[in-house]
């Protein structure tokens, strides 16, 4: 029966339309995802290489200075290089600030997510704080339109293809009166309906499966690594989402309306689920919990920077400022209280004070933002597409959560940098060529499976509830007498 | 009653009874009301905050204590992107371009894109009056008009009407009248939006944007006419309502969603924007080269002494340190301009590419036009970036000029921060940043390709509709 329906289906023009549109969109989505992922891999490598190249240049100049001293010809060195140059750890830290680079997410080729809007690298130095505003130059129009990635195809295009190919499973036969003739054959209405739907579903579902496997294979060949477990979950959720739309189409067909009404109903559902509700989610979230003001954050951070970095106008004020800051600094770092290099200590204390102030402001901002995120997640349960969007983005690794992990790890990394540079700066040590390898380098640790999946549990339950309720409604309709 | 009105009346009653007209109108009103409210709220919030902080930045600049002008240049000023009034209707790239940049000694990109703080759901598309008019109204046009002729053919009403002696052109005119009459809903909607904007923004601000608003309305009317003509033409051609609807929905989806995404994929493939790290690396390498080359201080001193016939450094009427700083900035400027313009020019190239790609999508053409007219397009962003850069350059050169003219010539560069201090008399020489966007004509001409394509689409769709309706058969 399935084979018979299959043969019947591929003789229809709609088969070729479905095949062409799905393969084209999947191919393009997959290709774009792969290109973005590989460009992110390249960018991360280049940024690290740039940092290493700069260090190598410094190392070379330092080596020349060391050789000049060793050969007894220090006059060949420019005096300015000795006043402020590569021999000083502070110069190295300030002029070649360490960089933390976010590597491409291992499954980033499946969804662009937040990777095109959020910074992918941060820099800081031993005396400066990290301000999470690294510039990005992506074309704003491209960002406005959004990436044609695999997630977009799964969430918007494939359901549309299913809706357009399934709105008329038996409506024409019913309107033409040939349905009764069909049912005089040894088959039932339900079986006919389900086989026709499954033929279309299998075509789209298998196309998606083949695309994901091919993409994963390409990425495996390029990187030598792939997260099969997470990939399997991504594939399952995507296929379940397509099954949801197939089930919706079956349910609408069971209402016994004309093909035109079916297409309007299914098209309307698609527009509401895929466009209107996700579009309205931010509006509602904004109304319930307004986005914290970024401009205000900039203002506060700026005021803090000027307060800590600008010296007081008179000598007495400057002394008082220095004493207060150093006292606070020694309270936090009693181990440095006996160091005589007050100027460097004062500079470090300024940077740290500023960091602490920014941390306070950021905390308030992030708390408000987190609250809005929660509200949005709660509202998005009204659209199955918005719910699945969040799940797929999180699994792909290009979500806010991974970005937050990156920021946390970057902050830790810059603390390690301080631990490395501070003693050398405070003790006025001379930097040696051999020490370049000791400078800490950033290595990102991917969030664990538990960290990724635990926050997704409520969303998974919502999606499950959507699927279960639609299945129950369709099964209940299937049990009713068919409208012929 | 004239047959034209009779046909039109029946058509309208039919649409009203099957609920399409009612639901479409109600949904459109709700969507426009919500999107206008949201757009205005966002505009007002962003605009007022940026304005307040811009003012406080100015106060900070002027309140700098007695210090060296080069230290003051290092403090610089944060310049915020002004929010144009029409961003409340058409936010365009507003969320995807940084809101502020630091105008100081070094040049910076605009940072803090509002999109960084927005939710993932925002990427599905921002709800705005413009997006509702660009995407939702064409959808409603399709839903209302797809069955204009097909249903009469399917049910045999067309044959019956013809048999009653109704002239063919009377029937077609009646159908067009009945089909297009719901478009009148748009008139009070447009007017309501304009009135709401007038009341909220105030008379003066509103009068300034009226011409742009009218041109935006014209571009949307071209889009609606294109979709209406397409729907009527397809309805006259298709064998069944179902086929007509299917084809039109595919067209809507293709032109509204697929083509723009394909365009982005193409531009990324063939004209990728340089990354920020590429640009910063170019500047970093230049700074290293400058350092290795060493400054031209000694040469400058010799040159100045010769020029002013000065026997020694102390008698020079200008500060060689200041001259060195001025020249160093002049030298570095072309490198910095070239590096940053490689990014900005790529935005402009992409904008032109998007305009050409609207050959496959009238929706894209309308979007290009409306963003440009609203002042939220890429061209307008690049204009602003250039204006900020000119401001930053003049701020720095004002500080350098003061050093040249007033700093004692014997003070060496490394003592400048400690030994040469100035106050408000210098800071006040730098005016507050103000920006006047390019005039309306320039904005219209900038989107010339999109305008031409929009008109071309409209004419083509009308010709198609006229041709198909003229040859329309009586039977399904």
Image (cartoon, grey):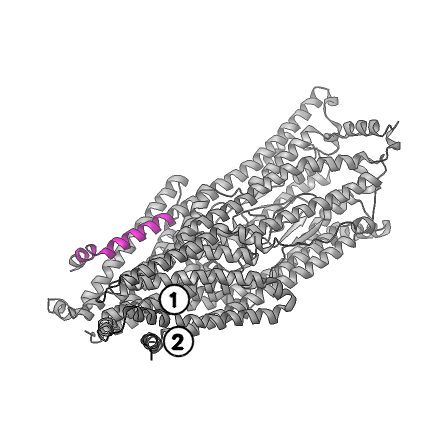
Q: Is residue B28 above or below residue A130?
A: below
Distance, label 2 to label 1, CA atoms, is 13 Å
Q: Majority secondary structure of the magenta segment?
A: helix
Q: Position of residue B266 (x, y in %)?
A: 43, 45
Badge 1, how many Cα within 10 Å: few under 14, some, many 20+?
many
Determine the chain carrying the residue at label 1: B
Q: Secondary structure at mark 2?
A: helix
Q: Residue A25 in magenta?
A: yes
Residue that mark 2 sits on: B22
Q: Position of residue A194 (x, y in %)?
A: 22, 64
Share a chain, discs 2 and 1?
Answer: yes
Looking at the figure, which quarter contains the C terminus of chain B?
bottom left
Question: Which residue lies at the image location 49% right of the left edge and 54% below the top edge?
Answer: B368
For residue A15, side relative to residue A216 (left or right): left
Looking at the figure, which quarter contains the N terminus of chain B?
bottom left
In the foreground, A420 or B189? B189
Q: Position of residue A292 (x, y in %)?
A: 60, 63
In the foreground, A164 or A394? A164
For residue B326, side relative to residue B307 (left or right): left
Q: Which stretch appears magenta?
A: A6-28
Q: Which mark is residue B141?
A: 1
């Amino acid at each position: 029966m399935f084979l018979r329906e299959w043969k019947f289906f591929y003789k229809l023009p709609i088969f070729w339309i479905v095949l062409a549109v799905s393969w084209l969109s999947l191919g393009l989505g997959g290709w774009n995802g792969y290109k973005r992922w590989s460009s992110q891999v390249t960018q991360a490598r280049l940024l690290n290489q740039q940092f290493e190249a700069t260090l190598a240049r410094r190392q070379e100049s330092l080596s020349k200075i060391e050789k000049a001293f060793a050969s007894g010809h220090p006059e060949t060195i420019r005096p300015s290089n000795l006043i402020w140059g590569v021999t000083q750890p502070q110069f190295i830290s300030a002029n070649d600030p360490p960089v933390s680079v976010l590597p491409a997410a291992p499954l980033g080729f499946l969804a662009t997510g937040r990777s095109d809007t959020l910074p992918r690298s941060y820099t800081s130095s031993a005396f400066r704080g990290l301000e999470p505003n690294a510039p990005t130059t992506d074309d704003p129009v491209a960002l406005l339109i959004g990436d044609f990635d695999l997630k977009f195809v799964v969430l918007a295009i494939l359901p549309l293809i299913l809706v357009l190919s399934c709105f008329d499973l038996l409506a024409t036969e019913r309107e033409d009166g040939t349905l009764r003739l069909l049912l005089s054959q040894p088959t039932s209405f339900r079986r006919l309906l389900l086989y026709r739907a499954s033929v279309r579903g299998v075509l789209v579902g298998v196309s998606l499966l083949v695309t994901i496997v091919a993409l994963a294979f390409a990425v495996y060949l390029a990187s030598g690594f792939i997260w099969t477990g997470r990939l399997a979950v991504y594939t399952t959720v995507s296929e379940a989402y397509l099954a949801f739309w197939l089930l919706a189409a079956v349910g609408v067909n069971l209402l016994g309306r004309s093909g035109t009404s079916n297409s309007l109903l299914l098209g309307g559902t698609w527009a509401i689920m895929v466009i209107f509700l996700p579009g309205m989610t931010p509006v509602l979230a904004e109304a319930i919990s307004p986005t914290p003001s970024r401009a205000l954050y900039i203002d506060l951070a700026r005021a803090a920077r000027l307060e800590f970095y600008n010296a007081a106008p008179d000598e007495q004020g400057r002394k008082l400022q220095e004493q207060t800051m150093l006292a606070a600094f020694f309270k936090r770092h009693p181990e440095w209280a006996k160091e005589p290099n007050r100027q460097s200590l004062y500079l470090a204390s300024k940077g740290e004070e500023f960091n602490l102030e920014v941390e306070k402001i950021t905390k308030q901002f992030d708390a408000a933002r987190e609250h809005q995120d929660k509200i949005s997640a709660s509202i998005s349960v009204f659209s199955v597409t918005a719910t699945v969007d969040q799940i797929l983005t999180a699994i792909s690794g290009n979500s806010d959560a991974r970005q937050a992990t990156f920021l946390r790890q970057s902050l830790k990394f810059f603390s390690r940098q301080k631990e490395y540079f501070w003693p050398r700066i405070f003790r006025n040590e001379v930097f040696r060529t051999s020490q370049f390898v000791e400078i800490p380098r950033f290595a990102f640790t991917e969030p664990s499976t538990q960290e990724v999946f635990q926050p997704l549990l409520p969303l998974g339950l919502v999606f499950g509830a959507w699927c279960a309720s639609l299945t129950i409604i369709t099964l209940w309709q299937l049990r009713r007498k068919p409208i012929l | 009653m004239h047959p034209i009105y009779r046909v039109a009346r029946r058509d309208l009653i039919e649409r009203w009874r099957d609920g399409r007209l009612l639901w479409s109108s109600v949904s459109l009103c709700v969507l426009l009301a919500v999107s206008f409210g949201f757009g205005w709220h966002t505009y007002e919030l962003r605009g007022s905050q940026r304005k307040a902080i811009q003012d406080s930045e100015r106060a900070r600049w002027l309140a700098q204590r007695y210090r060296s002008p080069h230290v003051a240049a290092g403090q610089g000023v944060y310049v915020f992107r002004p929010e144009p009034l029409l961003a409340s209707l058409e936010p365009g790239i507003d969320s995807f371009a940084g809101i502020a940049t630091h105008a100081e000694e070094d040049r910076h990109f605009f940072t803090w894109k509002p999109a960084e703080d927005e939710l993932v759901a925002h990427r599905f598309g921002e709800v705005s009056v413009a997006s509702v008019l660009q995407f939702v109204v064409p959808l409603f046009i399709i839903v209302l008009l797809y069955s204009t002729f097909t249903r009469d053919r399917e049910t045999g009403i067309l044959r019956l009407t013809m048999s009653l002696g109704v002239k063919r052109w009377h029937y077609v005119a009646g159908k067009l009248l009945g089909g297009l009459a719901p478009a009148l809903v748009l008139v009070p909607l447009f007017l309501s939006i304009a009135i709401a904007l007038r009341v909220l923004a105030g008379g003066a601000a509103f009068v300034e944007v009226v011409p742009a608003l009218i041109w935006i309305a014209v571009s949307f009317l071209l889009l609606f006419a294109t979709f209406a003509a397409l729907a009527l033409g397809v309805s006259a051609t298709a064998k069944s309502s179902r086929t007509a609807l299917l084809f039109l929905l595919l067209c809507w989806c293709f032109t509204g969603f697929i083509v723009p995404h394909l365009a982005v994929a193409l531009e990324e493939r063939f004209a990728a924007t340089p990354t920020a790290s590429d640009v910063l690396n170019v500047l970093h390498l230049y700074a290293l080269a400058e350092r290795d080359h060493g400054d031209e201080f000694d040469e400058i001193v010799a040159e100045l002494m010769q020029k002013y016939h000065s026997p020694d450094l102390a008698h020079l009427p200008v500060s060689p340190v200041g001259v060195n700083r001025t020249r160093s900035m002049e030298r570095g400027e072309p490198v910095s301009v070239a590096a940053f313009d490689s990014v900005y020019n790529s935005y402009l190239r992409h904008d032109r590419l998007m305009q050409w790609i609207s050959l496959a999508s009238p929706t894209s053409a309308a979007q290009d036009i409306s963003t440009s007219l609203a002042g939220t397009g890429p061209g307008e962003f690049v204009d602003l970036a250039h204006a900020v850069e000119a401001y930053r350059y003049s701020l720095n050169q004002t500080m350098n000029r003061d050093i040249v003219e007033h700093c004692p010539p014997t003070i060496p560069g490394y003592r400048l921060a400690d030994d040469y201090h100035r106050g408000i008399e210098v800071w006040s020489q730098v005016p507050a940043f103000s920006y006047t966007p390019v005039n309306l004509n320039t904005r219209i001409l900038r989107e010339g390709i999109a305008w031409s394509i929009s008109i071309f689409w409209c004419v083509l769709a009308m010709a198609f509709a006229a041709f198909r309706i003229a040859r329309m058969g009586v039977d399904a």
